[in-house]
Image (cartoon, rainbow, N blue to C red):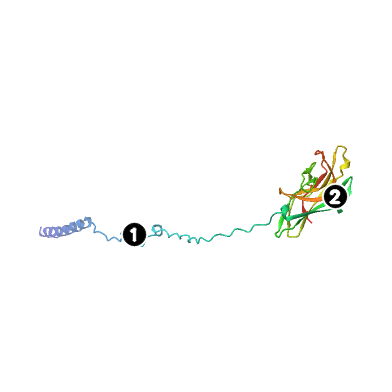
Amino acid sequence: MRSQKTLRGIALPTAAAAAVLLLAACGPAQPQSQTTSPAATGTGTASPSQSAPPATASAPPSTGAPTSAAPSGPGLCKAAGLSAATDASGGGAAGSVYMKLNLTNTGSEPCILRGFAGVSLAADGSGGPIGAAAARDESVPVTDVVLAPGQTGTAQLRYTQAGNYTDCSPVDAAGYRIYPPEDTASLFLPQPTTACSNADIKLLTIGAFQPA
């Protein structure tokens, strides 16, 4: 009996110690330390997406200096700066006379001949045209003919004999009235010939100007 009481006395403290250990294991866990990131405290360096936008460079102040305009090219040749002549070395065929109508730059600046002259026969230097003006011969393409002072541009002029037409109603002409291309002023070239007062008959044909 004594041995059993002794065993019971030993067992009780052992059971009590086990119970204490069990309660300690089931108790609340100790708080763990936390590490705060720089972004959470606001004291760290901002990420690239949070950085301020770079400052935009401002345009340099205007100096106010005027810009120079591109230099303009030569203007069109005008009657006031031209002289006129004909060269009949072209010969004739089938009742027609072929000649060169030459316009020479008498001014001090270059100018441009472009296209067709207006040509008609005239009674005198101050008189109006007689009959029909020259028809255009477009077999030669239009080109810009730049004339330096003293240079000449040429166009083929054809005169058909008035006697070829029975309904011509012939009249004497003192020469040719010539309007440079795109000009309203004219030149008079003395060259007596016969014109047709019938405006339905075209005695003259003119081509586009070309370099001489």
Residue 122, above or below 148: above
In the displayed orientation, state which residue is furthest to the top.
167
User: Disc 2 marks which residue?
Assistant: 98
Of the residues shown, which amino acid type is indicated by label 1?
A: Ala
Which label number is shown at residue 39?
1
Q: Residue at x 86, y 42 (%)?
A: 162
Q: Nearer the viewer, residue 11 or 80?
A: 80
Q: Nearer the viewer, residue 92 or 133?
A: 133
Q: Quadrant of the N terminus?
A: bottom left
What's the CA distance linking mark 2 and mark 1? 99 Å
Where residue 21 appears, x then y in whole percent? Answer: 20, 58
Which label number is shown at residue 53?
none
Is label 1 in a helix, a strand or a loop? helix
Q: Is residue 45 left or right of residue 70?
A: left
Is label 2 in a helix, a strand or a loop? strand
Q: Nearer the viewer, residue 106 or 146?
A: 106
Where residue 25 appears, x then y in whole percent? Answer: 22, 57
For marks 2 and 1 on the same chain, the one whose residue lies earlier in the sequence = 1
Q: Is residue 82 left or right of residue 166?
A: left
Of the residues shown, which amino acid type is indicated by label 2?
A: Tyr
Where residue 97 appears, x then y in whole percent? Answer: 86, 48
Q: Residue at x 32, y 58 (%)?
A: 40
Q: Nearer the viewer, residue 168 or 31?
A: 168
Q: Specify few, some or many for label 2: CA neighbours under 10 Å numbering under 14, 14-19, or 20 or more.
A: many
Where residue 117 appears, x then y in whole percent? Answer: 76, 49
Q: Quadrant of the C terminus?
A: bottom right
In the displayed orientation, state which residue is furthest to the left.
2
